[in-house]
């Protein structure tokens, strides 16, 4: 078992060094996501992304130059029993010591209109609150490259605005906490490949409310696949557009603090 855990850990910096580790380090360095003295709450949702994030953060803690603390927090929003069992099993396989706390978010959002948005907002607030109790100054989420591109398209198509998912964000309601996204440049296909290589099975979306629906984010995944089939690298250009905004060609913009 110990050898298996080490194999999984090593795969991040050896087999997937280019695809995962270097992309992870790029976001850490480019956006200064981690500093000496940080205490970071790595938020585990039960999916492949958050578990990979946990292992990357551990690797950075062991071999990086910065000295910081980590705690791994799992909010139970009302998971089905089989989902929770799989999460705990994976935590054991990956040797992650979870701090678990409960909420009733799945019950609260039932019947609401924009449940995915509402769920994300309520989960974020609960995670901020718990992280603050634990004395953390940052929370780390497992959003990756594809999540960012999907968010840009969702904002444009559904809300009529150009808005991206930031790699680092200061909390308004839970100051001085910061939110960081260290997998910002990691592609989802590489995360899936890493999981498959290590024979790891994770939960997808565990939401009881949307399990029979096709959420907006899934629609965006299909749209991006279509765009890439017509224009190679379309998703990369969408991501790069967030750094290449020409204000001289914009009719108007909003500057929100």
Image: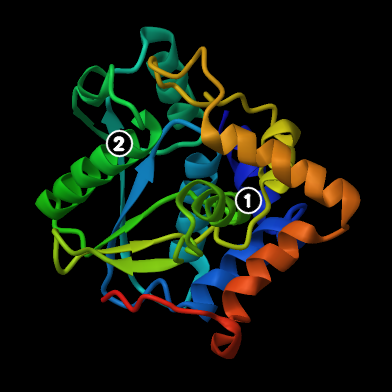
Residue in the foreground of this view, choosing between 50 and 252: 252
Residue topped by disc 2: 118
Residue 116 lies, in percent from the top left, at 39, 33
* Residue at 45% from the left image edge and 51% from the top image edge: 159
Left or right: residue 41 versus residue 199 is left
Place of residue 227 in the rendered image (x, y in percent of width and height, measured from the top left): 80, 49
Q: How crowded is mark 2: few (under 14 residues within 10 Å), some or many (20 or more)?
A: some
Q: Can residue 96 be seen in this view?
A: yes
Above or below, 32 relative to 10: below
Q: Where is residue 140 in the image (x, y as percent from the top left)?
A: 37, 55
Q: In which quarter of the image is residue 113?
A: top left
Coordinates of residue 68 in the picture (x, y in percent): 32, 68
Given residues 153 and 102, the one toward you in this image is 153
Residue at 73% x, 32% y is: 196
Evaluate whether residue 98 shows in this view.
no
Quick one: which residue is furthest to the front in this view? 251
Residue that carries the numbered disc 1 in the rendered image = 146
Earlier sequence position, callout 2 versus callout 1: 2
Tell me how far mark 2 sits from mark 1, CA to CA: 21 Å
What residue occupies the far top of the structure in this picture?
81
Specify whether 137 is left or right of 222: left
């Amino acid at each position: 078992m110990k050898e298996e855990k080490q194999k999984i850990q090593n795969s991040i910096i050896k087999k997937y060094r280019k695809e995962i580790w270097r992309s992870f380090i790029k976001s850490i360095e480019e956006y200064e996501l981690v500093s000496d003295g940080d205490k970071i709450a790595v938020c585990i949702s039960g999916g492949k992304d958050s578990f990979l994030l946990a292992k990357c953060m551990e690797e950075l803690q062991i071999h990086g130059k910065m000295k910081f603390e980590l705690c791994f927090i799992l909010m139970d929003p009302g998971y089905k029993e089989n989902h929770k069992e799989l999460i705990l099993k994976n935590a054991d396989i990956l040797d992650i010591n979870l701090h678990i706390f409960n909420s009733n978010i799945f019950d609260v959002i039932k019947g609401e209109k924009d449940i995915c948005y509402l769920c994300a907002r309520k989960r974020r607030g609960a995670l901020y609150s718990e992280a603050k109790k634990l004395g953390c100054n940052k929370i780390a989420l497992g959003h990756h490259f594809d999540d960012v591109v999907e968010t840009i398209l969702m904002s444009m198509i559904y809300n009529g605005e150009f808005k991206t998912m930031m790699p680092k964000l200061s909390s308004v309601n839970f100051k001085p906490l910061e939110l960081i996204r260290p997998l910002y440049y990691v592609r989802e296909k590489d995360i899936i490949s890493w999981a498959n290589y290590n024979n790891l099975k994770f939960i997808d979306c565990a939401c009881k409310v949307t399990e029979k629906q096709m959420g907006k984010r899934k629609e965006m995944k299909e749209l991006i696949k279509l765009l890439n089939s017509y224009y190679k690298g379309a998703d990369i250009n969408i991501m790069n557009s967030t750094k290449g905004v020409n204000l001289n060609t914009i009719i108007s913009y909003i500057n929100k603090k």
